[in-house]
Amino acid sequence: MSDPRSHEALIDQLGTELVPVRRLLPPWLRTAGWLLVVAAIAAVLLMHYGLDPMLRRWAGTPDLGWAGMGAVITAITAAWAAFALGVPGRRAAWAWLPLPGALLWVGASGLGCLRVHVRDLIAPGTQLATMHQSADCLVFIISFSVPLSVLLIVLLRRACPLRPVLTAVMVGLASAAASASLLEICHSYDAAATDLLTHALAVAIVVAVNAAMGGRLLSRA
């Protein structure tokens, strides 16, 4: 028969070795913290480029404004979904949260492309981008997505994502959408097919790289 005193001693020993765990903030609050960084970058860009050119483009061609709003909504909801998926017990259905914003983003961008190529109506203060100029947009989106993705992954590593790849996809989508939103501040090209395809390629690259690398990093959290 085992000695109850040895059990108590073992329990006491295990209890003294426990390290207090700091409770994570709610997903919406961590999302707000990440968005503050995005807002700080936007403020720097606005100080350099000003707000009037973007508002002028949106007033002359509202589809660009709706597309920009869709990108902002996608960034917010995808980041929120990533933080929610990092909480054990949360359902995978959180990954559908960015869908409405993404549909608005893609749909409005498509309407802008039709406006340019069917009605030949160009947004004020813009031009149609060449392949070389569109490549600059690709570089912009990827360049800004890298630090934003790294920040999200660092914040998520304190959590315990049970679906690391799906969470990393949300990280990539949030970062790419936020970068596309920032691009609106200084984007002097209209929604031509080459420009939209370049944006789509940039978003696909960011999401794919996050799914491959971010998933591995989060799986070790």
Image (cartoon, rainbow, N blue to C red):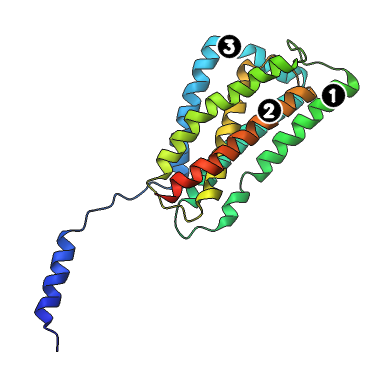
Instruction: Tell me which numbered mark, 2 or 3, is placed earlier along the sequence.
Output: 3
Q: Is residue 113 above or below residue 204?
A: above
Residue 206 in the image: x percent, y percent?
Answer: 58, 34
Q: Amino acid at mark 3?
A: Gly
Numbered tag placed on residue 199 in the rendering: 2
Residue 39 in the image: x percent, y percent?
Answer: 50, 26
Q: Quadrant of residue 103?
A: top right
Which residue is found at the position 67% from the left and 39% from the top?
102
Front-lying residue, 197 or 60: 197
Front-lying residue, 127 or 62: 127
The N terminus appears in which quarter of the rendering? bottom left
Name the mark nearer the viewer: 2 or 1: 2
Numbered tag placed on residue 115 in the rendering: 1
User: Is residue 118 rendered to the left or right of residue 93?
Assistant: right
Instruction: Tell me which numbered mark, 2 or 1, is placed earlier along the sequence.
Output: 1
Which residue is found at the position 50% from the left and 46% from the top?
215
Q: Secondary structure at mark 3?
A: loop
